[in-house]
Image (cartoon, grey):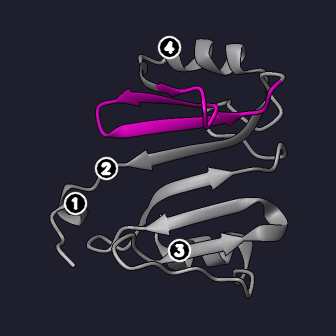
Amino acid sequence: MKEKEVIELFGEEDSEVSYCMGCGPDMYYKNLGIFARLSETKQYVKDIKITNPKYDILGIKPNQNITKAQNLLEDMGFKLIDRDPIRQSYQYQKKKLTFQLIIDKQGAIKSVQVEYKVKKDNNIIY
């Protein structure tokens, strides 16, 4: 999806727009609980994070139990590549897609993030 399509779907982003050197332009919809990052070389969404349980990514959404999400990802062929007990995060990968799940102390998902690895973006040197 291109930036224009995101704006058509969700409207203009919130005024708290965040940009950082080396990580591409960000689209921030705080009131919706949606954050997106655009590819610098392809100009489409390559990364999306949700914190609002109204939305899901491939059936995985905030407030869902981590076990259910893990089962869904494994059923789709994703493999656990990293677990960080300090940040309480889990990372799953399948080819160029990476899922990151951040959970609370009760095992409920706080945020779901998926990223598509864009090789040309990774080759940019700042």
Disc ID at residue 122 = 1
Q: Which residue is mark 3?
A: 26
Distance in Å between CA atoms under marks 1 and 3: 16 Å
Viewer-nearest residue: 86 or 29:
86
Nearest to N terminus: mark 1 or mark 2: 2
Q: Residue at x 32, y 74 (%)?
A: 40
Disc ID at residue 74 = 4
Left or right of 40 in this view: 53: right
> What type is the residue that disc 3 sits on?
Asp
Cβ atoms at labels 1 and 2 below 8 Å apart: yes
In reply to whether residue 30 is colored magenta, the answer given is no
**Is 58 above or below relative to 54?**
above
Nearest to N terminus: mark 1 or mark 4: 4
Nearest to N terminus: mark 3 or mark 4: 3
For the C terminus, the image quarter is: bottom left
Distance in Å between CA atoms under marks 1 and 2: 8 Å
Q: Residue at x 39, y 29 (%)?
A: 93
Q: Secondary structure at mark 1?
A: helix
> Image quadrant of residue 71?
top right
Distance in Å between CA atoms under marks 3 and 4: 29 Å
Q: Which residue is mark 2?
A: 117
For disc 3, the neighbor class at 10 Å (few under 14, some 14 to 19, many from 20) is many
**Is 7 above or below relative to 35?**
below
Nearest to N terminus: mark 1 or mark 3: 3
Q: Secondary structure at mark 2?
A: loop
